[in-house]
């Protein structure tokens, strides 16, 4: 409900335009109250991810804009991971646990998917984070519904979002000059070969254990 309402009410408040209007205020507050600004930024970022609100990309760029590449990338990745853990736990302790057991009891393709995920949990979870296919909120909910272990979800989320987070945080470090010119940041850099190929390479590396197991079973 919060996600649906927030998509309409907060869409304009969590945008590049809103950031452009407030960037001088944010810089002044950061300079005067650094630790309070870090805590406030991370809590707000966690809430955006936990409630699947719009604006996660804006927050990641803001982390680079306010705090630099480092420790900005650390603040971004930690906040996004904690927010993802929040929605993961909410989904699993709410309807997710019953949903997972219901799917398992019914059998069929979904039950086989659950079994396959258990056999390749690390690889599949890393793939969900590295490959730019699933929206971030779905990559938080699907593991909860398939009864993935919390520890594995947390570790793969933290390290899996780090490459993309590093790129966006780096773009955010130059955001001040872009906003001063009244422009929006150019996110097409994410799809340039220099950025996309290494991330896809990491995704292929994550998929390698799955392929090895598949071909071994075929040989058997």
Image: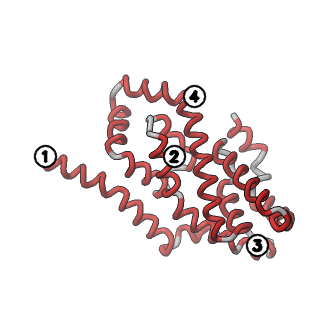
The residue identified by callout 4 is: 94
Indicate left or right for 169 with 100 as reference: right
- Viewer-nearest of discs 2 and 4: 4
Whether residue 111 is situated above or below residue 180 in the rendered picture: above
Residue 133 place in picture, x, y as percent: 49, 53
Lower sequence index among marks 1 and 4: 4
**Helix, strand or loop under label 4:** helix
Indicate left or right for 204 with 219 as reference: right
Between the residue at mark 2 and the residue at mark 3, the CA separation in whole angstroms equals 31 Å
Lower sequence index among marks 4 and 3: 4
Residue 105 place in picture, x, y as percent: 37, 23
Between the residue at mark 2 and the residue at mark 4, the CA separation in whole angstroms equals 17 Å
User: Which residue is situated farthest in the left direction here?
Assistant: 220
Between the residue at mark 1 and the residue at mark 4, the CA separation in whole angstroms equals 41 Å
Between the residue at mark 4 and the residue at mark 3, the CA separation in whole angstroms equals 41 Å
Lower sequence index among marks 2 and 1: 2
Contact? badges 4 and 3 (CB < 8 Å): no
The residue identified by callout 2 is: 139
**Helix, strand or loop under label 1:** loop
| Residue sitting at x 19%, y 46% | 217
Residue 24 position by quadrant: bottom right
Indicate left or right for 215 with 12 as reference: left
Whether residue 43 is situated above or below residue 113 in the rendered picture: below
| Residue sitting at x 54%, y 27% | 95
Residue 83 place in picture, x, y as percent: 62, 46
Lower sequence index among marks 1 and 3: 3
The residue identified by callout 3 is: 176
């Amino acid at each position: 409900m919060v996600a649906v309402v927030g998509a309409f009410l907060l869409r304009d408040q969590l945008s590049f335009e809103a950031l452009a209007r407030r960037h001088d205020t944010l810089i002044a507050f950061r300079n005067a109250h650094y630790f309070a600004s870090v805590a406030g930024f991370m809590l707000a970022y966690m809430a955006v991810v936990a409630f699947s609100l719009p604006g996660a990309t804006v927050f990641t760029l803001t982390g680079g804009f306010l705090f630099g590449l480092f420790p900005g990338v650390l603040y971004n990745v930690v906040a996004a991971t904690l927010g993802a853990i929040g929605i993961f736990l909410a989904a699993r302790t709410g309807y997710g646990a019953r949903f997972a057991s219901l799917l398992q009891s019914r059998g069929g393709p979904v039950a086989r998917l659950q079994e396959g995920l258990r056999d390749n949990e690390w690889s599949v979870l890393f793939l969900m984070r590295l490959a730019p296919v699933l929206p971030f909120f779905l990559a938080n909910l699907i593991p909860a519904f398939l009864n993935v272990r919390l520890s594995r979800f947390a570790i793969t989320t933290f390290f899996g979002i780090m490459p993309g987070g590093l790129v966006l945080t780096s773009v955010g470090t130059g955001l001040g000059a872009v906003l001063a010119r009244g422009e929006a940041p150019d996110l097409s850099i994410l799809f340039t070969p220099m950025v996309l190929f290494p991330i896809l390479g990491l995704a292929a590396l994550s998929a390698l254990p799955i392929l090895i197991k598949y071909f071994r079973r075929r040989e058997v």
